[in-house]
Amino acid sequence: YAIDDYALNEALGDEASFRDFVIRANRKGMKVALDFVPNHMAADSVWVREHPEWFVQDPTRVPTVLSLEDYLPPAVSGPNGFSKEFYRRQLERVVAFAVNIGGKIYRIAHGRRDYDGGNPWQDTAQFNLSHPGLQEKLGQVFSRILDLTNSGAVRVDMAHYTLKDHINDAWLRPLGQKAMEKEFMQKILSEAKAEYPEAWFFGESYEQKEGLLQQIGIN
């Protein structure tokens, strides 16, 4: 959900042990599925630090934005999550954050349904899915997942948010940016199916978008 990087967590084991786990599952007639989150990353992820241009820049929403350290845990955390102080200051309404990278200040939108929508996910940063470099990187991650799982399965988080009509209406048009013309996930799925024909693709979907997702290649 709020991913730092697409890398195996060393606290759980190394790549060799994961591949062994997959083989043991396959021998019992099971596939292994890994999660793929193409809408957002963790707000403090390595991708934000290394490629801030891959995220939605939100220069006009509010006069000032906060540094993450001002409102994310542990700064305003309580025993069960965010503290009363967090809500008293209405920090749950914060829609963008400031980050200094190489001496340049970036104002990055938090992940959420759309530019005008409420309920931002404060621990995430919103991808700009029209960025060619990001699309290429996501394709590499997708292929890497299928390699690791031995043609297993990918569960695409918030898959309907990857559809070009949603991206155009939710982000690009409100920000005055050029609309996307092609379904970038269709290309990723098509290439994945050619290389890993036995793989399965699941999509988390709401808003009655299941048919459109199946058209672009989600099973």
Image: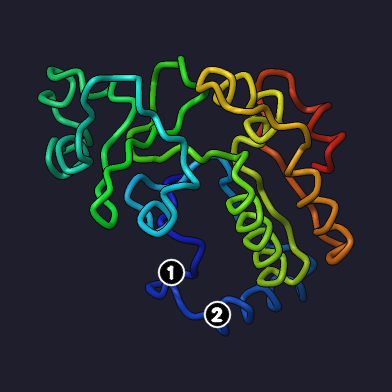
What color scheme is it?
rainbow
Q: CA distance from mark 2 to mark 1?
A: 9 Å
Instruction: Mark 2 or mark 1: name the one nearer the start of the chain.
Output: 1
Q: What residue is pinned by disc 2?
A: 15
As displayed, is residue 149 above or below residue 68?
below
Viewer-proximal residue among 130 and 6: 130
| Whether label 2 touches label 1, CB < 8 Å | no
Badge 2 element: helix
As displayed, is residue 143 above or below residue 218?
below
| Quadrant where the C terminus is found in the figure | top right
Q: Quadrant of residue 178?
A: top right
Q: Is residue 124 left or right of residue 148?
A: left
Q: Determine the residue positioned at 76% across, 32% down.
A: 181
Badge 1 element: loop
As displayed, is residue 164 above or below residue 218?
above
Q: Which amino acid type is marked by label 1?
A: Asn
Q: Determine the residue positioned at 64% across, 24% down.
A: 168
Query: Residue 152 placed where, x, y %?
Result: 75, 63
Mark carried by residue 9? 1
Q: Is residue 124 left or right of residue 83?
A: right
Q: Is residue 20 left or right of residue 101?
A: right
